[in-house]
Image (tube, rainbow, N blue to C red):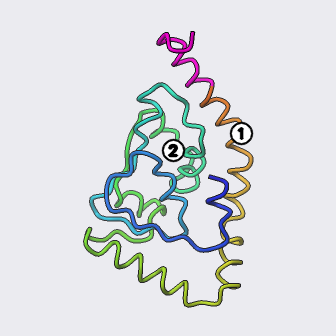
Amino acid sequence: MQRLVDLEMPIVAAVNGPASVHSEYALLADIVVAADTTVFSDFPHLTFGIVPGDGIQIAWEEAIGVNRTRYLTLTQGSFTADQAERWGAVAEVLPLERVLPRAQELAEQLAAKPQLLTRYLAVTLRQRISRRMAEGTQLGMALEGLTAADLAYRSGDGA
C-alpha cells in the first residue's frame, strides 16, 4: 500500500465491476472512473474473522470518511458507485462500456503533460495519504496478523 501511494506518477483507475477484495487499491487512485454497476465492499476480512488492518481502513477513511468507514466495516456493508461519487471517492460514474475508454483518455491527457509536472503533482496530492499509510499500517497489520493467527489456532491449524 505504501509503495502505491508513493508512486511518482498519477494513477487513473477504471473500476468495471464489483470491488469486494482489495477495493482500496482502486480508491487510492488519483482519478477513479467507475461503472454504474460497481459495488465496493470488503468481503474477506470480517467473513474470515480478521481485522482489516492492511491499509483498507485508511484508504476507505480518506475516500468516504471516518464514520461511513466505521459503519461499513463493522456491518460488512457495501456502497455503490453512485454513493461513492456523492461521497467524493469516485470522479465519474459511467455506463460499463464507457469506463475503460474514459480512463484511458484521462491517462493519455496526463501522460501528455511534462513528466516533472505530473511526478510532483502526484507527490503533492498524496502527501496526507502517504503519511496516514506510514502511520496506520504497522499497527493494523499487526492486529490483522494476530486475528489471522488466532483464527488458525481456533480451527486447529495452528497447534
Q: Nearer the viewer, residue 35 or 8?
A: 8
Quadrant of the frame with the C terminus = top right
Quadrant position of residue 51: top right
Question: Is 64 left, or right, of 116 in this rendering?
Answer: left
Which element type, helix, strand or loop, lies under badge 2?
helix
Dominant SS of magenta comes to helix
Which element type, helix, strand or loop, lies under badge 1?
helix
Q: Which of marks 2 and 1 is nearer the N terminus?
A: 2
What span is in magenta?
A: 146-159
Vertical position of residue 154 compared to residue 121: above or below: above
Residue placed under numbered mark 1 in the picture: 138
Q: Which of 7 and 18 is in front in this view?
A: 7
Q: Which residue is rendered at x = 52% and y = 39% of the image?
A: 70
Residue placed under numbered mark 2 in the picture: 69
Vertical position of residue 42 compared to residue 151: above or below: below
List x then y, in percent, for residue 76: 41, 35
Q: Distance of mark 2 from mark 1, alpha carbons?
A: 19 Å
Q: Which residue is rendered at x = 67% and y = 54% of the image?
A: 2
List x then y, in percent, for residue 43: 40, 38
Q: Let me know if residue 153 is in the magenta part.
A: yes
Single out the mark in the foreground, 2 or 1. 1
Q: Which of 147 and 73 is in front in this view?
A: 147
Q: Let me know if residue 59 is in the magenta part.
A: no
The residue type indicated by label 2 comes to Thr
Q: Which residue is rendered at x = 62% and y = 29% of the image?
A: 145
List x then y, in percent, for residue 44: 43, 35
Q: Which residue is rendered at x = 48% and y = 59% of the image?
A: 26
